[in-house]
Image (cartoon, rainbow, N blue to C red):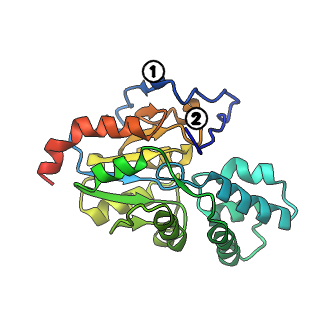
Amino acid sequence: MTGVRTKGSADGAAAPDPGAVAAVTSKPAAPEQGAAAARISAILFDLDGVLVDSLRVVERAWTRWAEEHQIPPDEVLAVVHGRAAREVIAMFAPHLDVAEQELLVSGYEVQDGGELAVVPGARECVALARQGRWAVVTSGVRRLATARLTAVGLPVPEIMITADDVTMGKPDPEPYRRAAAVLGVPEGECVVVEDAPMGVLAAKRAGMTVLAVTTTHAAPALHRADLVFPGMPGVTGWLGERMPAELADS
């Protein structure tokens, strides 16, 4: 996918060919995880890697932070995707003021917004979601999420759950459970679109159906998702086949 770099999985597996539509995988979820939603009442999007391609901006900001504190950047970059900044900071520099450092890193990201782009296919998927109830659920802070959506010309949803709104970030289910509660829909009727293993795990723990895209991580790293797509157009197609009847009753 243009402008979106795919990482290898944690076990070193090679990244899938982005053009290989046949690589979409479907696997039944375990009963305790919840099968595909029989009714879709809301669509919940992760932000970075799902709607906005911010990979280079994120990695530059964290590399800068790591180097300032004499921490190997590769170690930080290996865990940063899908996690709240405060959790990453606590992992590597617990002796520092976490809130202060979180503001510092988010400031780096806001300042370096020149390479942000819409993930291919995301605009069409959001347009479909806006016919019903939808939200963005991100590990970033609100000012950063709002700035990114605005920068690429995507609508800022009425409901957006950010790191500012929760006590525990992904992979804890709190962010996704909070989104469902605010939207007033059962958790089992939510479909989540994610690109990171931590986000997939959070949504599954919340009892939601998860559609993953390989825009940031290779398919093996996203094995907990109900479906894995090579890009957002596949997500839009899958939702488009299932949404009309549900949306009519929303």
**Which label sits on residue 22?**
1
**Which label sits on residue 221?**
2
**Residue 163, image x, y percentages:** 52, 67
**Residue 217, image x, y percentages:** 59, 39
Q: Give the amino acid at mark 2.
A: Ala
**Neighbour class for label 2 at 10 Å: few (<14), some, many (≥20)?**
many
**Neighbour class for label 1 at 10 Å: few (<14), some, many (≥20)?**
few
Q: Give the amino acid at mark 1.
A: Ala
Query: Split into 4 quadrants, where in the image is the C terminus?
Result: bottom left
Seen from the viewer's position, the closer of residues 191 and 203 is: 191
| Residue at (55, 45) in percent of width and height | 196
Farthest-out residue, top: 22
- Asked if residue 196 is positioned above or below residue 27 in the image, the reply reads below
**Residue 100, image x, y percentages:** 69, 78
| Residue at (84, 59) in percent of width and height | 71
Horizontal side of 93 relative to 214 (left or right) equals right
| Residue at (52, 63) in percent of width and height | 168
- Asked if residue 175 is positioned above or below residue 200 in the image, the reply reads below
- Asked if residue 69 is positioned above or below residue 17 in the image, the reply reads below
Q: How many labels, in total?
A: 2
**Residue 191, image x, y percentages:** 33, 46
Farthest-out residue, right: 70
**Which label sits on residue 123?**
none
| Residue at (35, 65) in percent of width and height | 157
Q: Earlier in the sequence, mark 2 or mark 1?
A: 1
Query: Split into 4 quadrants, where in the image is the N terminus?
Result: top right
Q: Which of the 4 image quarters holds residue 98?
A: bottom right
**Label 1 SS:** helix
Q: Which of the 4 image quarters holds residue 108?
A: bottom right
Residue at mark 2 to residue at mark 1: CA–CA distance: 18 Å
**Label 2 SS:** helix
